[in-house]
Amino acid sequence: MTVATPSLATTSVRPVRVGGFDATWLLWIAIIAVLLFLVVSPFVYLVVTSFTAERTGGFTFANYGVAWGRARYVEALFNSLRLGVVSAGLAGLFAIPLAWGVSRTNMPGRGFVRMLVLATFITPPYTGAVAWILLAGPNAGWLNRFYMFVTGSEAGPLNIYSFTGLAVVIALYSFPYIFIFTSAALELVSSEMEDAANILGAGTWRTMRRVTLPLTLPAILGGLIICFLEAIALFASPAMIAIPARFNVATTQLFQFFGNPVRVEVAAAYAMPLLGVTVMLILVQRLMTHRKGFVSLTGKGGERRPIQLGRWRWAMFGYAMFVATLSVFLPYLFLLQAAFAKAWGRGFALDNISFRNFHFVLFEHATAAQSVINAFLFAGAAATAGVIITLGVAYIVTRRLVPYSGILGFLCIAPFVIPGVVLAIGFYAAYAPPPLALYGTALILILAFTTRFLPIGYVNNSAALRSINPEMEEAVRILGGNRITALRRVVAPLLKRSLLGAWLLIFIPATRELSSAIFLYGPGTKVVSVMIFDMSEEGNFEYLAALALLLQVLTLPLLWIGQRALGRDFMLRRIAT
Amino acid sequence: MSKLVLSNITKSFGAFEAVKDFSLELQKGEFVSLLGPSGCGKTTTLRMIAGFMPPTSGTIELDGQTISTPSGVVPPEKRRMSMIFQSYAIWPNMTVGENVGFGLQVRKLAGAEIDRRVDRILDVVQMRGLRGRYPAELSGGQQQRVALARAIVVEPEVLLLDEPLSNLDANLREEMRFEIRRLHDEFKITTVYVTHDQSEAMVTSDRIVVMNKGRIEQVDAPHVLYGRPKSRFVAGFIGRTNFLAGRRQGSDVLFEGFSAATSLLEGANGTGELLYSLRPQAIGLAAQKPNGGALAVEAEIAGRSYLGEYWDYQARPLGAAKPLRVSTGPNTVFEIGSRVWLEIDPAAMVRVE
């Protein structure tokens, strides 16, 4: 038997230069151009704008003078930093025991607790903030009313409109980050390491203090840093809570610089320290979690046995339920109440129940329904673009198709260190003025969302590509298929699930993205997060609750698809490695 | 005419020279192994033959046509070769049949013809019944057979194997190396086989290329390589051996504990230190002083290990510091500390550099 072989095109060698100019180079140039547009140019414009005089366009330091010239502007930044520290600390208190309980002990209901953490994770911070306004608003808040009912006193003890109130609300909805980091690290500490301490005479507590905790400490600190950064970058919760409480944080101050008239130059100058702090802490976090020597974080985990807690397992479970009550049960209960109430203050009476709110936001309100559609369309476009771009980059980087490909990977990761509000200012500075004049268009929102979530796409796609042995492709080539055949027949089919996962991991947060949207939307391009924010300013909590719940319900099928494709934990896997 | 010719191939990664001045000619149908410790450049050489990387200098020719030069290479898909990878690289998204038929599909054969050939080759590797299975449902050995079938079914000009057995357990590895040789005897495909396992190379190969630090140490048939190693590295790498350092004095060469006449030893006319390799199997062990032409050296048993198929003794010639390793049959038993006589045939002593 003989095989008809393709003729060997080598009567004279026609050299095909490896790394020479071919189609991969064109692709590389195209991708560089896209990344310049999405990442580099907004950043450059942000910096340049901060040194640009508003009227003349000349070089000036004046913007910094205006931005930092008043004590209350400076104070806003310090409020942010303080808020970050307190929120991260509180979030640590919520998250670390839960992570330990879920990943290392025989606490009952571990799967249930994990599910509740996921429920917390997918609750947008603004939705949580609104729920807590319903719960802990002075006098009218349900917890205060319950307290007054029980004790007969004149006023309730809780006031959400305070620094403490804001810090608690932020902590409640950012603790999943620490949970994710900590449980990922705990799951890599093998029982054998703890056994080794036990056999040398250390008890459970000493083992935890001397072995388990030090091994997981970098991850815990990394999680705390992410929480801190989340808190200082957050716009919605401070806007809803801090402004009525008459104090400012950096993001709300930025928003005011951005209000009428738009002083983008001052805003850019004001954003610089925020950016600086973020970049610095991300570097610290990287150094910590990537430090060599913590074998248990990089090596194989080995066998793991749950620690037997005895009677304490119920105490542990109780604590988990306490946290979940604060972050999930109470908020959702009263959001539901408000969504189905004629007036939320009238409580659970049967005659107070109505579907009017849903009908209103879906069919009567001028832009509410459209804002949901907008959010999903923009998020869909951004997720698609993000997945395609990052897949291209990840392929080029992992297969080292071109020299200096590492730069491309760096550009994809870079937006991670830019807070959403700052990114939005950069986009505004770069693309709002002519010739592009994109301000208020759907395109600028899509581009901003794409940039904002490039790191998620890149991290996931390059992990997926690294899991495919290059020999899979080489096998195609040596058997006569070219690179395209290899991509089409082998790589693409193997990546299907991961690509869907990456798409969802971008899409889900993009549908609820507020901090960059609030600076860039126009009359026709309002997204649901902005809509919810507006309703909170108008005090329409019934409509708001209905809309917020609608958004959550629409997310559920996506979660289900993601879990089918990638496993139960796909949202809670470490996202920032 | 030679099938595959590598001429003065060098490959550098930055300042590191992975392969240095490598030249080799393969005859049509020949089975040649590249053998050496990890990092010796054998896989790099194989990947240059496959066309996955260009040489830094030198050329590769197939059937008289140049396929690799530093300035350009014929891409792997145009070389009509096939390869078996260390990871097998069986595509998990395709069934056994689809994996094996892939190369034929790329060559645009008719569907019925592909089916016929796939079935035939699966018969050869005894996998016909598993044609519809997915790789995840196969054992390591079965995946290995699929990889073999996939590589052979296209009847490549050259078959390349990159440590194909290193992921299998010991028993299966032994079985598969006979299988690989059997397939070679059946199809007569010119083959280059990379391995760090000397017994794998010895079972499968017509010739073995021993490599060390990017250079060729020796190219020979397995029995020549074992019996007549040219360098200290080859003698130490292929099988176990004793190194004996001698010094010429008059018409004798003095070793530790004994001496031999230069006329009996090969290459003994050099000066300075003369290094010889002596295999443990080439030394006899006896309770009484033997008669005959062999050298008789009195020694003491310093240690021993029983390995089932043979005894591994450490016998120290009287007056020497270092014991020699001696292999005997499992029934030749000496206690530690007892006096014995070593029987050394000078012709078995091989001068190495």
Image (tube, coloured by chain):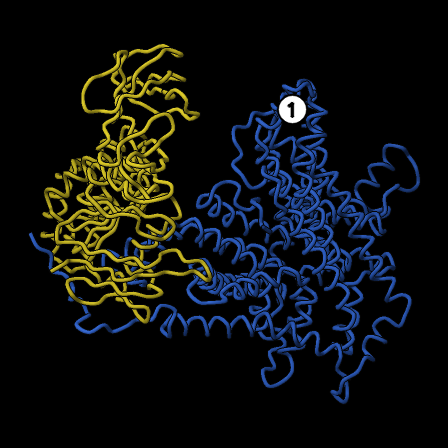
Can you say whether B11 is above or below B122 in the image? below
Left or right side of B123 for B68: right
Q: Which residue is mark 1?
A: A197
Residue name at image x 76 percent, y 72 percent: A267
**What is the three-letter code of the residue carrying label 1?**
Ala
Picture coordinates of residue A31, whole percent (x, y): 48, 70
Is label 1 in a helix, a strand or a loop? helix
Q: Quadrant of residue A278?
A: bottom right
Residue name at image x 38 percent, y 44 percent: B38
Residue name at image x 88 percent, y 41 percent: A156
Chain B colour is: yellow
Picture coordinates of residue B170, whole percent (x, y): 31, 29
Residue A343 in view (yes/no): yes
Can you say whether B210 is above or below B24 in the image? above
Tell which chain the image draws in blue. A
Left or right side of B245 for A359: right
**Which chain letter goes with mark 1?**
A
Picture coordinates of residue A33, whole percent (x, y): 51, 75
